Image (tube, rainbow, N blue to C red):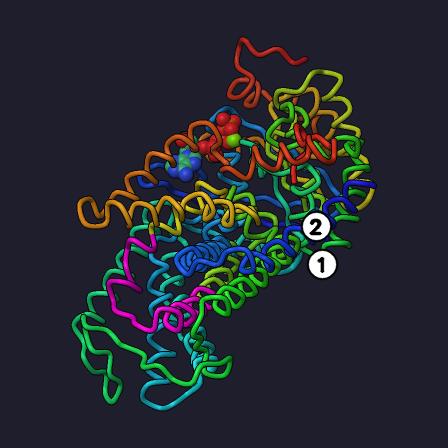
Amino acid sequence: MTMLQVDNMTKEFGGLRAIDSLDLTIKKGMILGLIGPNGAGKSTAFNCIAGSFAPTRGEITFDGTRITGEKPWNLCKMGLARTFQIVKPFASKSVLYNVTVASFATTGSRKIAEEKAVAVLESLNFGDKKDILSGNLTIADRKRLEIAKALATEPKLLLLDEVMAGLRPNEVDEMVDILKALRDRGITIFVIEHIMRAIMALSDRIVVIQFGKKIAEGLPSEIANNEKVIKAYLGEDYVVA
Amino acid sequence: MNHQHFNKVMIVGLLVAAFALPLVVRSATYMHILVLLLFYAYLTTSWNIVGGFAGVLPLGHAAFVGIGAYTSTILSLQYGVSPWLGMLVGGVLATIAGVIIGLPTLKMRGAYFALATIAFAEGFRVMVENIDYIGPLKLNGPRGLQIPPLETGLTSFMFATKEPYYYIILVMLLAVMLLTYIISRSKLGYYLIAGGEEPEAAMALGVNVARARLIAMAVSSFLTALAGTFYAQFSLYIHPKSIISLDMSFEIAFIALIGGRGSIIGPLLGAMLLRPVSDFCRIYFGDTLPGMHLIIFGLVLIFVMYYQPRGLQEPLSRMYQRLFTRKTLATTGR
Ligand SMILES: Nc1ncnc2c1ncn2[C@@H]1O[C@H](COP(=O)(O)OP(=O)(O)OP(=O)(O)O)[C@@H](O)[C@H]1O
Ligand SMILES: [Mg+2]
């Protein structure tokens, strides 16, 4: 039962090879973590999978359908949702409005879309902020809004790009619990994260990339003890929290 | 009295005042100015569907006014077609033109789209100025077309006094404002605004931004052309410089930006402020400084953008809320 399969994917920007022959598989109902140093190509991998740009080479299969080069709005309707590392709220609009845009993905009625948006916000303990202008939110809340928007499209697969960056430790714990609850509801999750504590607690498996290439894959415990990973990614001055 | 109820009373009051205005204003000159004010409010409200909600800046809408005016006028002069029917035909032609221009340009960002629309509108004007006939259709080049007086009445879309024109354009304006309100609360409206603010994020949420913009462009072009027919019947004389002028395209954009782009009331507020300036300048500086009104618009725009980047509707609706409904908008977004 494969939710997402990436075969031999390469993405080049001019002369720069940001992704180099990457293979990935995510089983349904699983949380896969993606880690790697800054500039390793993590966000680029997401952008290729979610349709922001077409990969230079390679194939992507989502829930049995080939989706290589498919447009992002079609992917969204097929059940693939993503968040952006650099959050992109519709800043002049309220939180509720932002999430309603997303829930229109599955309905044409504003009433139904708004009800769904409220339900999503409440499931994220975010209901009390629904009337706040999204441009006025704190970083933590903006990240939460990104997740709320992605969820409101009713995804089967959720790509999360550093949704915990900038959160306080207790907020990170809360987010880990939220994501685990989503997985228990049947949503497959592919998550990029720099906070080791969170990614270790969250992931069923972890993939490590460096310079666009996969250098390791395995259970969190295996990754934590992998020589190559420790050398390449964690470095000398990195402390496993 | 709750605030929703109060809003209704307020709207009904304003409507009554708008319909009663001709009973008070007896001067034909002032009526003329009022008709043009509503005409520009209508144009800007139509423009706003794409220029306000979709976050692009079209600067060639006069082309659609021209298509509307020329279509209904030629059909009525040469084939005796009722201007009302010609109005619809013009609307359809303008929609087609709008879609043809929109398809390649609406994916462009900012200045590129604006420049492309200017280029199209100016190209269209120069063409009309240099064409006397398209097959059997007489355009009459730079001399334009004169509509000879017929029997007055609603069927001929021709009246001896200004009042009927006032009521027609008032009803057209109210209809298009209502339509804007409906769109703003629909999926299309949400998609336009989302795609205007953050296209990439919108696309990831299932919004086909280019398609939403194209629909908005089609609707906007159609509605704009209807006003072209109105103008032709009101002035009974059209020529390329009056009806397809860059001046008109710019004035629409100024009214929208100053009044409040993307809001329902903004275009009307902008027209109420800028049209009198425009008329005043034409009356007093028309011969000596013909471009004066655009210079003043530019200055007003700088001033408004500096203090109220979202246009005059913002402080006014806030004031209204504070004075009458006691519901602050400080943190809530609508
Ligand atoms: N649109 C683009 N055009 C050109 N180069 C790009 C583009 N996007 C990313 N890159 C380059 O590709 C490489 C990978 O970038 P990417 O953003 O995928 O890294 P990342 O692993 O997400 O890093 P971080 O942890 O800092 O978010 C970098 O060298 C980056 O400069
Ligand atoms: Mg990144």
Q: Residues within 10 Å of mark 1 (few under 14, many from 20)?
A: some
Q: Where, by quadrant of the figure, is residue B158 drawn?
A: bottom left
Q: Residues within 10 Å of mark 2 (few under 14, many from 20)?
A: many
Q: Chain of mark 1?
A: A
Quarter placement of the C terminus of chain A: top right
Across and down, in percent, residue B43 comes to 44, 58
**Residue where numbered disc 1 is placed:** A107
Q: Which residues are magenta?
A: B222-249
A106 vs A12, left or right, is right
- At horizontal 63% and vertical 41% (from top left) the residue drawn is A159
Q: Kindly tell me whether mark 2's CB lies below 8 Å from ligand 2.
A: no
Amino acid on which the number 1 mark rests in the picture: Thr
Across and down, in percent, residue A147 comes to 68, 37
Secondary-structure class at tag 1: loop
Secondary-structure class at tag 2: helix
Magenta: main secondary structure equals: helix
Magenta stretch contains residue B240: yes
**Residue where numbered disc 2 is placed:** A103
Mark number for residue A152?
Answer: none
Amino acid on which the number 2 mark rests in the picture: Ser
Magenta stretch contains residue B184: no
